[in-house]
Amino acid sequence: MIEVKHLEKYYGSDGTVTKALDDISFISYDGEFLCIMGASGSGKSTLLNCLSTIDCASAGDILFNGVSFDSLKKSELAAFRRHNLGFIFQNYNLLDTLTLGENISLSLLINGAAQGTIQKHIHDIANQVGIGHLLDKLPSQVSGGERQRCAFARAVVNSPKLIFADEPTGALDSASAISLMKIIASLNHTLHSNIFLVTHDALCASYADRVLFLKDGKIFSELVKGEKKNREFYHEILDNISLLGE
Ligand code: ADP
């Protein structure tokens, strides 16, 4: 469980201070697929950076299973990152000279997985994201959607507790984007991780369990999917975006 308490983030100093996060509080329970939306400059990246320990908040607290990030020593924070966090970015961030299989294996090797189990892990996760037949290909030999599915496989192969997806569909056509969202939502059920997705795309957001809308660094509103079908949730999200004045 992630608990965010009165989070504030300021950039700059003296006369040129920007308040990027303004008293943000929420709880995300284990297994939640949470989407963060808002106009450019509303604080989405700053919030994601604080949640993923890439950046420190100026005030407030973030607790993971009751433990404050602030209370962790440098070495504890490094171990926390290695074992609990997975990332997926708009531009894939795959290593071009390694095959898809080797890209996925990197995060297992870094985490000290036993040699004998690595190939099985790679094949299992690759099959789940639909790239099992492409493991010997280089990133340049597959489509953008397949690259991103590989990046997602790499992000989740260690079963991290927190997965951060920053505009993962930004470079994809709409069919590949929806296919990726279906994979993320379905694997989320299996992994029971918390997923934090930043997207501008209401259709992609409709796959999440909940959407937080940021405006000027504050939580403007939130929508919970509950038992709604994607289409109904999608229209609710669109209505909220128009209220947001984007
Ligand atoms: P979003 O991801 O929603 O586009 P950001 O979190 O990037 O929003 O930015 C929130 C606010 O903080 C914006 O006003 C932005 O200009 C400002 N900001 C973000 N990063 C920095 C930085 N490194 N230095 C100064 N201001 C920043």
Image (cartoon, rainbow, N blue to C red):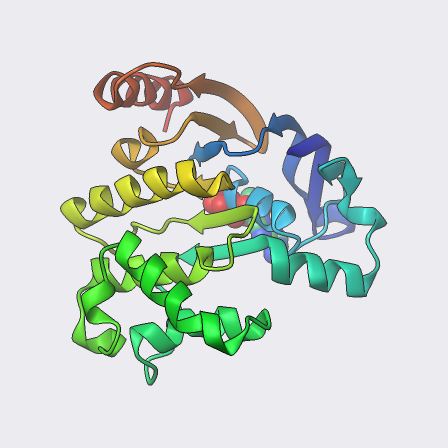
> Is residue 159 at all visible to an observer of this figure?
yes
Return the x and y of residue 29 as percentages of the image width and height.
58, 29
The quadrant holding residue 142 is bottom left
Q: Is residue 128 above or below residue 104?
A: above
Residue in view at x 41 percent, y 36 percent: 189
The quadrant holding residue 18 is top right
Return the x and y of residue 8 as percentages of the image width and height.
71, 37
In this orientation, which residue lies closer to the viewer: 49 or 127?
A: 127
Residue in view at x 27 percent, y 64 percent: 147
Q: Which residue lies furthest to the front in this view?
A: 116
> Is residue 40 at all visible to an observer of this figure?
no
Return the x and y of residue 230 as percentages of the image width and height.
25, 23
Residue in view at x 71 percent, y 62 percent: 79
Q: Is residue 159 above or below residue 25?
A: below
Number of marks in the rendered image: 0
In this orientation, which residue lies closer to the viewer: 139 or 238?
A: 139
Q: Is residue 225 above or below residue 148?
A: above
Return the x and y of residue 202 as percentages of the image width and height.
29, 31
| Quarter of the figure with the N terminus | top right
From the viewer's perspective, is 14 left or right of 212? right
From the viewer's perspective, is 98 left or right of 214? left
| Quarter of the figure with the C terminus | top left
From the viewer's perspective, is 199 left or right of 145? right
The quadrant holding residue 85 is bottom right
In this orientation, which residue lies closer to the viewer: 149 or 245?
A: 149
